[in-house]
Amino acid sequence: MNPYMVELITPHPVRTARWFRDVLRLEVTLDDEKTGFVLLERDGWRLALQEGCPASAGVNLVIQVANLQEARERLAALDVITSEIATVPAERYRKSVCNSPDGWLVTFFQWD
């Protein structure tokens, strides 16, 4: 069994798809305006956006990056506000957090 995709419910799939395309560099591979479904992909993982009213806000996306500072600078150029870099010494990584337009927590991290 292999997970196929993560699906997020959003009232604004087109706006949200643009954000994930720009911020996470995902490619839109399917955009079905009739059903309000957008599929984005990158490096073997899929993120689906389905138009609707989210039942729960308990979604956190965690993205590994090679260079956390460069990622923060790229996000800043897109007017995405990120937290200061926090170090988690016990687990040997650093992270910075932002929110998607729909309020989902997105954590970018780099192993130390």
Image (cartoon, helix red, strand yellow):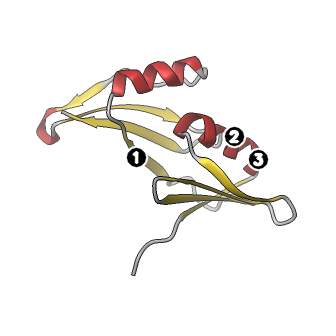
List the residue tagged with mark 1: 62
Q: Amino acid at mark 1?
A: Val
Q: Amino acid at mark 2?
A: Arg
Residue at left offset 33%, top offset 37%: 109
Q: Are marks 3 and 2 in contact (CB under 8 Å)?
A: yes
Q: Which mark is residue 14?
A: 3
Residue 13: horizontal and vertical position, in percent?
73, 51
| Res 83 seen here | no
Front-most of residues 92 and 99: 92
Q: Tell me the SS state at disc 3.
A: helix
Q: Tell me the SS state at disc 1.
A: strand
List the residue tagged with mark 2: 18
Residue 39: horizontal and vertical position, in percent?
65, 59
Residue 49: horizontal and vertical position, in percent?
66, 57
Residue at left offset 28%, top offset 35%: 110
Classify 10 Å Cα crowding around label 2: few (below 14), some (14-19), many (20 and above). Answer: some
